[in-house]
Image (cartoon, helix red, strand yellow):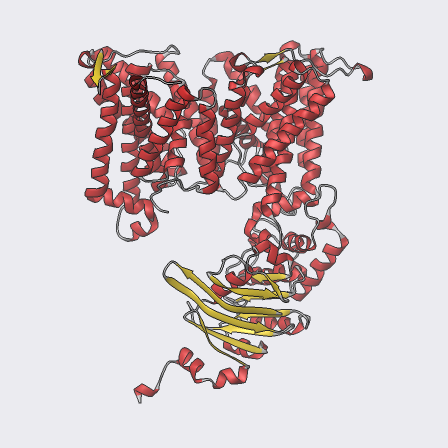
Amino acid sequence: MLEVTELCKSFGGLRVSRNIAMKLEKGERRVVLGPNGAGKTTLFNLLAGTLQPTSGEIRLDGERITDLNVEQRARLGLSRSYQKNNLFEGLTVRENLALAAATARGGTSSFFSRIHESREVRETIEEVAEMVALADKLDLGVAHASYGNRRQLEVGLALATKPKLLLMDEPTSGVGPGMIDAFHRLIASLPRELTIVIIEHDLDLGFDVADRITVLNYGEVVFEGTPDETKGSDVVKEIYLGDWQDDA
Amino acid sequence: MVASADFWLTQFLNGLQLSMLLFLLSIGLTIIFGLMHFVNLAHGALYMVGAYAGVSVAASLGNYWAALLAAPLAVMLVGIVLYALVIRRMRRSGPMNQVLVTFGLIFVIVDLVRIVWGDIALGMEQPAILSGPAEMFGVVYPAYRLFIIGVGFVVMVALSLVLSRTQIGAMVRAGVENDAMASCLGINVERLFFVVFCVGCALAGLAGAIAAPAFSATPSMATDILIPTLIVVVIGGLGSLRGAIAGSLIVGFIQTFGAVVLPGLASVLVYVLLATILIFRPVGLLPARS
Amino acid sequence: MFHQTRLKSFAVTAVIAGLSLYAIFGGFFPREIVVEIALLAILAISLDFVAGYGGMVSLCHGAIYGIGAYAYAGMTAIAGFDAVTGTIAALLATALFGLFVGAVTANISGIFFIMATLAFGQMAYVVIFEWKALGGDDGLSGVSRYDLSAIGLDLDDSLQFALFCLALVLVVYAVAAFALRSSFGRTLSGIHSNENRMRALGLSAWKHKAVAFSFSSVLAGVAGILAAQHTMFVSPELLVWTVSGEVLIVVILGGLGTLAGPIVGAALLVFLKHEVSAYTEHWHLIIGLFLIAAVMAGGRGVYGQAEHMLRGRIRRPADA
């Protein structure tokens, strides 16, 4: 469903992403692990179109999207939630979700329609609010919402576009354990046809949710496999735990 | 249309003279803009104050050179007052608020000048040794205008030396590139801004005093010169001396030669260039940080 | 997000009603003032649409106003077309100019955006100033007002013209409000709030901004057409950048992003100008100080402050 080949990104002499290759099946849950600075968010930026690669190809459902910009990729069904909350400040939760749902549906340029208030959009808002546990907070102003709620909305915005491919950048960053559990249940409840890539720091969550895991280090893919394979890999252990043999 | 070499030489000198005036105004504005991220639309009004201050001092003391010294000081004083009352507080506001506040300042300063000096254009005597014609490259040209060009060059060289050879110059360049980092390095950025702002005001005052004998002091100076100065700053590039030099030369020459070669179209030409730069390279041709 | 609240309705009706009475019972000069306010209000509403609700602070709306005035004047007084054709031509001219500026500046933001609009406005000023056929510095006269005798109105009568202009303020307000509540307007608010997120949701933000600027320009063009008819004369002074500055001041004094604020601000500024001018020649000084104080104090504007205080007492959906 998503095919990434030889993806490279350099900023001048600094090679941030090197020869990244990934192949995702439809409905797959792929978790991307790696230490800070490994290039995980850069990878997302390349996939979403915020950054243009120096070389390499990205294919979505067989179609080449490497040259497409952010909005064009979004219209093909790619959706993204951000590591740092990227919400519509000054508006309510409902208005935020309305914007996401309506924009994805299209018809937002008309002076003669009111799609943000249409039944279809309202149904999507209720559905998504239920999924991210914000159903009772729809009229809350985002500026007054707690960090956890804002994080929930961040995910909600990405879901409200009814995407085909969902990229989630550290969705549980900064939230408490109770919410991590809730988030875990949310992922499990998402439609099986939806392909999801998650950047995670919480290893328990990562191993639990993933069908396959990709590990990045210094901009390269150093390992790819099932959760069990990843747990057993020496390469991965060394990245996260260091090399103990020399201390013996 | 084949004109004589003399004609073109005269136009060249005209262009250079306009460029120097624009330079004196734009260098202050661009460093303030690049360093403090502050848009000061009242900069043109300060130029006007310099012209009027020059006129008054020259009239009361009967000495041109005293006026040339007093005007920058007077404008610098006005600048200090403005900084303390308004600019220091508005520095971190968004561009729209800065535009509005400095727009208001234009109103206030222009009207205050009109109250004190009236509405009629006021002339200023050129100093005896500079009035009259001079010969340059075989062409006869007003000596006073050559003086304007000369002053511009001296300031250009002086600033170039200060910026590249002195510690304060290094601090200014550091601040323009990254003020947060500069402040982490122990540079008192707030004090630096204040100093730079004062110097910018002094230069505007100097430009006004120099222009007064050639062009007369009028209240409309404040707004007439503002747009060309802004254009120079944007085209040349923010925060850099080279940008200010390049920008003033480009605008000065386009306006001068354009008026002669393509009258009517010349004025539009500068705006077309400005729009092109804003669309394709908004940081300008030679910005301090690219 | 725009919501037509009771406060907005009250403010708009109150100002328009008050001005109508002032025109009816006053003599010639009050009617001139009312027309001045009406034109400024329409222009300010058009600017608030893109600046307050779209985040695009333009310093060329004065020039757009001038383009509308000149297009109407040129088509009717010089080319001899009828009023309807002239109106359509003027609105088309402003729409195209706005579309062009909006498209070209769509990816510029902050102070550079403001300066870009300033540049384009000045360009328009210079082109019109240098265009000999349009009269240059002397301007263009011989513009006539709409002939509404078919519905029993004589716009050459100062009272009827004043009331006609006030009616158009209501029309322009209603059109802008309608647009802001539509899919287009909601999306514009989204762009204002977070353009990058809107793009990530699939919106071609630049196209939307260009159309928004064009729509706003059409509204400004309406003011221009009326201006041409009011004095039956147009001059390049309409396009000077300081006019654009004054429109922005009106929007700020009334309340940016409130739509009703600009109408209040226009009335405020014009009355202040005339009152102060009666005592002193230096009303610019007073306005300048007022403006500086207003912006430094937080800049919500007279109407905007009222709205803010009311919201503090009543829980309402966010009125951004």
x then y, percent, for residue C287: 48, 23
Above-or-below relation of C241 to A132: above
Q: Quadrant of the N terminus of chain B?
A: top left
x then y, percent, for residue B80: 30, 31
The residue sitting at the bottom extreme is A248
Above-or-below relation of C72 to C209: above
x then y, percent, for residue A168: 56, 66
- Closer to us: B161 or B10: B10
Q: Is residue C306 visible?
A: no
Q: Which quarter of the figure has residue A35?
A: bottom left
Above-or-below relation of C158 to A105: above
- Closer to us: B26 or B57: B26
Q: Is residue B80 visible?
A: yes
x then y, percent, for residue C291: 48, 28
Above-or-below relation of B183 to A244: above
Residue B111 horizontal side relative to residue C252, left or right: left
- Closer to us: C230 or A38: A38
- Closer to us: C2 or A163: A163
Q: Which quarter of the figure has residue A166?
A: bottom right
Labels in figure, total: 0
The residue sitting at the front extreme is B2
- The residue drawn where x is 31% and y is 34% is B245
Residue B82 horizontal side relative to residue C100, left or right: left
